[in-house]
Image: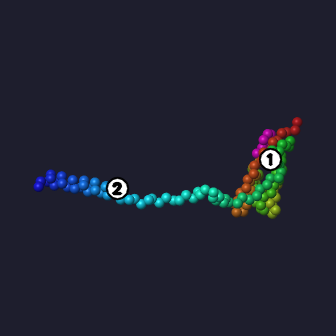
Amino acid sequence: MSKTYLLLIGGLVILALAIGGYAFYKSTPRLPTYTQPSTNYPNQPAAPTKNQITLTVTTPQNGAQVATPTITVIGKTVANADVSINDADLKADAAGNFTTTIALEEGDNYVSVTAVDDSGQVAEQEITVTYTPAN
């Protein structure tokens, strides 16, 4: 036999093995792939969130209209919480009471009150006060 015939027979054998391997691969059943089950089940309550602390602004009321350029903000939260009212930082007393006076600009003023307790829990409240100077 010549070299050409040997190469031709070798190539045909390799081709036959490749076709047979492919046929075997396609004929064998596949195992199903694992997928993570969904954790969003219908009618199941949402995961609990971090408890918020209480925060109540008693004065001024939301939507208040005043004729003075300053207001006193009074409220209550948890004892000894850090309280921020716009740019003023203060601390609630042992009963959770806080008070401070802030300046207003003519027109609508947004008063943002934030309280943070010792464990980092946060409560926020925003109110709008309208300052209209007396004529």
* Mark 2 or 1, nearer chain start: 2
| Residue 56 part of the magenta segment | no
Query: Mainly helix, strand or loop, the magenta region?
Result: strand
At label 2, which amino acid type do we have? Lys
Residue that label 1 marks: 62
Residue at image x 80%, y 47%?
62
Q: Callout 1 environment at 10 Å: few (<14), some (14 to 19), or many (20+)?
A: some
Residue 94 place in picture, x, y as percent: 81, 63
Q: Which residue is mark 2?
A: 26
Q: Is residue 54 left or right of residue 21?
A: right
Q: Amino acid at mark 1?
A: Asn
Can you tell which quarter of the image residue 18 is in? bottom left
Asked if one can make out residue 91 in the rendered structure from this viewpoint, the answer is no
Q: Are marks 2 and 1 in contact (CB under 8 Å)?
A: no
> Is any part of residue 67 visible from this angle?
yes
Q: Position of residue 131 (x, y in %)?
A: 82, 41
Q: Give the residue displayed 78% in from the left and 45% down from the top.
A: 128
- Residue at horizontal 76%, vertical 60%? 81
Extent of the magenta region: 105-110
What numbered label is drawn on residue 33? none
Residue at 75% of width from left, 49% of height from top? 126
